[in-house]
Image (spheres, grey):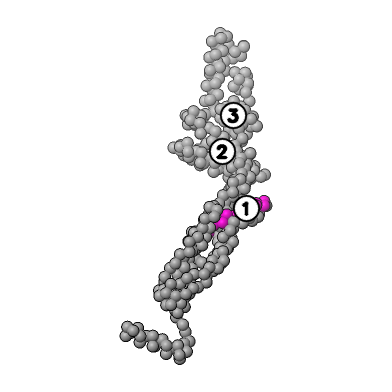
């Protein structure tokens, strides 16, 4: 019987902690699981050895016995069982075994008539679990793989909540996208990842939003920012200007002598707050004074007169 080094199977050394053993087992069991390696006998054998190594090393008492007996563990274990049986028989039947010699234990050099067959599971594992059949051992369940997807949208698309149907791994998923979702934001849809293995739960689907700005607004969270051109005359004398917002046009009153770079706030005219129905950020408008070009002779004359007036304080 070939000796199986359980530490080597799990790619660990003897100083490994219980946490190390769990992590190594999960990683390797997923890698070599038969459902993920169909028709691969080597992977199946490796998977069985991984399960066996985990069952022994994760249990402090079993691990202690394994560490104690080393490569001779199988004989030491059976010898102890046989010795206990011999002591019991001597105590209650005068030292005999029903006419059999003390060295026979059932004949043919066996131990109590037991037979051990070469297989993928080591003899030590069989002895620790009472020779239970493979079908009777606990089945390890594995959570399905998580899926990741990227959904491309325009900024104007996420101003209002909308429904979309996505196809992921051959499945159609009806998804409600809340208004106000942000670029780079990731949401989780539970149970829409890969199928679980051996009855384990499904993985999850993670969707990351990639939002392209198709508007003249700059977005920062729930607030919007925009520059508004203002002609020199309206800025100086006051008046009104009509601007675009996400939900239509708005008419603003411009105060006389408005300076270049002045910012005004339109409360509630920003972007929807994510998952807070009816709540909106604000819209900030910054005035950029536009100097007229291609002046006529009369316009230049009037501006020069205005300049003289300003100089003389008239």
Q: Position of residue 139 (x, y in %)?
A: 61, 35
Helix, strand or loop under label 2? helix
Q: Residue furthest bottom?
A: 297
Q: Residues within 10 Å of mark 3 (few under 14, many from 20)?
A: some
- Name the mark on residue 114: none
The CA distance from mark 2 to mark 1 is 40 Å
Report how far apart the C-alphas of labels 3 and 1 lie in the structure.
50 Å
Q: Quadrant of residue 123?
A: top right
For this view, does 159 lie left or right of residue 236? Answer: right
User: What residue is shown at x 51% (from left), y 62% (from top)?
Assistant: 269
Q: Residue at x 59, y 18 (%)?
A: 105
> Residue 267's spot in the image, x, y percent?
48, 61
Q: Secondary structure at mark 1?
A: strand
Q: Nearer the viewer, mark 2 or mark 1?
A: 1
Is residue 227 in view? Answer: no
| Range drawn in magenta | 171-186
Taking the image as shown, residue 89 lies to the left or right of residue 67, namely right
Q: What residue is disc 1 on?
A: 175
Tell me if residue 176 is in the magenta stretch: yes
| Residue drawn at x 56%, y 17% as measured from the top left | 85
Residue in the image at 64% along x and 30% along y: 136
Circle 3 sits on which residue?
126
Above or below, comparing residue 66 to residue 156 in the picture: above
Asked whether residue 248 is in view, the answer is yes
- Residue 160 in the image: x percent, y percent? 58, 58
Between marks 2 and 3, how big is the CA–CA gap?
Answer: 14 Å
Residue at mark 2: 50
Q: Position of residue 287 (x, y in %)?
A: 45, 72
């Amino acid at each position: 019987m070939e000796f199986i080094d359980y530490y080597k199977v799990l790619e660990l050394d003897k100083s490994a902690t219980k946490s190390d053993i769990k992590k190594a087992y999960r990683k390797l069991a997923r890698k070599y699981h038969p459902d993920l390696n169909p028709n691969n006998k080597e992977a199946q054998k490796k998977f069985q050895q991984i399960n066996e190594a985990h069952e022994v090393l994760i249990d402090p008492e079993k691990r202690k016995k394994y560490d104690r007996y080393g490569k001779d563990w199988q004989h030491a274990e059976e010898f102890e069982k046989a010795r206990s049986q011999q002591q019991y028989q001597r105590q209650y039947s005068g030292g005999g075994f029903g006419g059999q010699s003390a060295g026979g234990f059932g004949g043919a050099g066996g131990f109590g008539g037991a037979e051990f067959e070469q297989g993928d599971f080591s003899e030590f594992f069989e002895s620790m679990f009472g020779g239970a059949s493979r079908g009777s051992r606990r089945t390890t369940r594995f959570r399905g793989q998580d899926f990741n997807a990227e959904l491309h949208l325009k900024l104007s698309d996420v101003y209002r909540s909308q429904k979309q149907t996505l196809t992921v791994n051959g499945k159609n998923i009806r998804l409600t996208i809340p208004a106000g979702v942000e670029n780079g934001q990731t949401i989780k849809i539970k149970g829409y990842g890969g199928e679980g293995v051996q009855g384990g739960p499904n993985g999850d689907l993670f969707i990351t939003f990639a939002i392209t700005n198709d508007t003249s607004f700059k977005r920062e969270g729930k607030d919007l920012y925009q520059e508004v051109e203002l002609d020199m005359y309206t800025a100086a004398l006051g008046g009104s200007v009509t601007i675009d917002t996400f939900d239509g046009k708005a008419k603003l009153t411009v105060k006389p002598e408005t300076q270049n770079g002045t910012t005004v706030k339109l409360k509630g005219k920003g972007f929807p707050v994510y998952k807070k129905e009816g709540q909106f950020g604000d819209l900030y408008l910054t005035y950029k004074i536009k100097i007229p070009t291609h002046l006529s002779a009369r316009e230049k004359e009037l501006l020069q007169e205005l300049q003289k007036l300003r100089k003389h304080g008239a």
